[in-house]
Amino acid sequence: MIFLTRFIQFFLVAIPLTVMVWLVNLWFVPSGVFVVEHEVGTSSAFIEELKPETRVTDVYENEQDEMVQAIKQDPAFFFLHPHREEFFDQVVFDVWFQNKALPIVELGGLAGVNPETYTLYPLHNRLIDESTWNRIDEGGLVLLQREETYGSLADFFADPPSRDEVAVYRTSFDVPYRIEEYQPTTSIQTIDASLRGHHEFKTYIKNETLSFVFNYMDMNREEGEDVVQVIVFNEQNQPVAEARAGDDGNASDDAVVGYGLKELQLTAYSLPEGVYKVVMNTTRDVFFRTIQTPQQKVVFLNTLFIGDEIGYREPSQGTTLYTESKRLRFQTRHAQGIQTITAGEQKLDIAQPYEWYTLTLTSEGLESVVLPTGDVETVTEGTFSFSPSQYFNPDPVSLNAYTTIEQLGVDYVLAQYQSPRQEGDWLVATVPFDVADLYEEDQTWKFSFSTPLIEELGAELLIHRIDTWFNHY
C-alpha cells in the first residue's frame, strides 16, 4: 500500500514536471531544430491549407488510404506561421508529391511585395530527369551534355564552352558577354513609357560613362513613404553606383501629386567593359514617366508594369515592346486598362481586370508587342526593350517549361538542381529557404507552388505531405 501511495505521488509530480520540460524544450529548442510534420487535410498551428479553393481540389483519400490534394491551376499557395521566427535561420521543406505531366514544378518563398517577388527553388524538372543526354551531378549542380565532352564539372569550368552553347536553369554561367563591334555614342535616347514601381534592367558599357536620368512622379495612392533608390550592379553582382531620392513629404493615400515631375540622375564613371544590372527600387506609388540615357543597349528583365498616365497626360499614348520571349502574360488592374494587344498578326483581348491572359508568339527572333493604352502588367521569362536597336540578350539561354532541351539549340545544360527521391508512390523534394530572404508579415510567411502549363495540359500536381524543419545554425 505504501508503495502504491508513493507511486501515485511520484506520478502526480512527474506529470507536470514532464509537461514543463516538454514546453521548455518546445519554446527554447535546445537542439536548434524544430520539426513540423504535416499531411494535407490535417489541422496545424504552423502550416495552413493550400489556397485558393478555386485552384485546388478538396482533400481526398486515395486507394492506398493516403490523404491527397490536387493543385489544378497556377499558382496555389500556403501560409507558414514560424515558431519563433527571430530564432531560426533556415526553413527546409520536404514536399511529397506526384507529377505525371508538368515539365517543371517549383516552390517559391515570398521575398517582397509591391510587386510580389518570389525566390524559386525546383521541386521537379522532368526536362532534366528524362533527358537522354550524358549527366553529371556534383555538389547540387547538374551538367547535361549532348555528347560526353567533360568528365567532371571542374573540367567544364576550367575550359568552358562558348555562351551560345550553354543553357542554364536556376544558376549562372559566368562567361562574360561582350559585343566586339560595339562603339559608344553620346546620342541621347528617351524611353517614353510610364513604368510603375520596381523594375530591373541591364545595359552595356564600354569605355563610357553610365548615365541615366529618371523623370518620375509620386502619385500617393497608397499609404507610406515612397523612397526612390536606383542601384547599379557589376557582373560580379557587386553594387558600384547608387542614386537616391526621399519621399515627397506626403505619405498618405490622398492621390495628391505634390511636386509634379521630379528628376533623379544616376551617373557612374570609369566602369570596366561589361554588362551592368540596374535596379529601380521603389513602391507602386512611383511612376517613372521617362528615362533618358546615352547607353545604346537597355533591356528590362522579366516584368514590366506599364502604369496609367492619369495626372501626367491624357489620353494615354500606350507603348510598343520588343522581345524574343515566346510566352507573355498580361494583367490590368483597372477597367480603363481593358484593351486588345497586338503582336504581328496575333491579337489578345484583355477583357477583365485582375485576370491573367497568355499570348504565345510564333515568329522567330525579335517581335513587337503593341499595348495601345498601357495600364497593364507584362510578365515573361526573358527580356524586353522599347526599341529594336536597344535590344540585346546578355544572358545565356534559360531552360523553362515552354520549350524542350532539343529546341534550345545548345550542347550543354547547367542547372542548380537535385532530383527528388522516391518514397513509395511519392516523389520527395527537399527545398531550403534562408529566413533572411523571406518576407514576413504578422508572423506569417507565404509559399507558392509554380506549376506553369498546368491548365493548358489539363494536368494536376498531387500533394500528400509538406514536412517542415526550422533550423538554427
Image: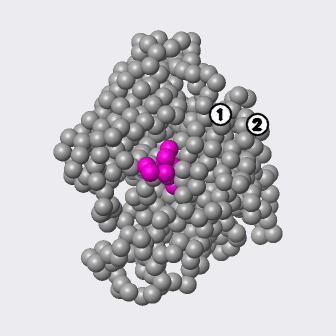
* Front one among 236 and 70: 236
Tell me the amino acid under the disc marked 1. Answer: Thr
Q: Give the range drawn in magenta.
A: 380-390
Tell me the amino acid under the disc marked 2. Answer: Gln
Q: What element carries label 2?
A: loop
Mark 2 — residue?
352
Quarter assignment of residue 331: top right
Q: Identify whether 18 is placed above or below 468.
A: above
Please tell me which residue is depicted at 20% across the width and 41% down the height of the picture: 269
Q: Identify whether 416 is placed above or below 4.
A: below
Q: Could you tell whether 400 is left or right of 215 in the image?
A: right
Q: What element carries label 1?
A: loop
Q: Could you tell whether 159 is left or right of 192 in the image?
A: left
* Front one among 328 and 76: 328
Please tell me which residue is depicted at 42% across the width and 71% down the height of the picture: 164
Mark 1 — residue?
373
* Cα–Cα gap, marks 2 and 1: 15 Å
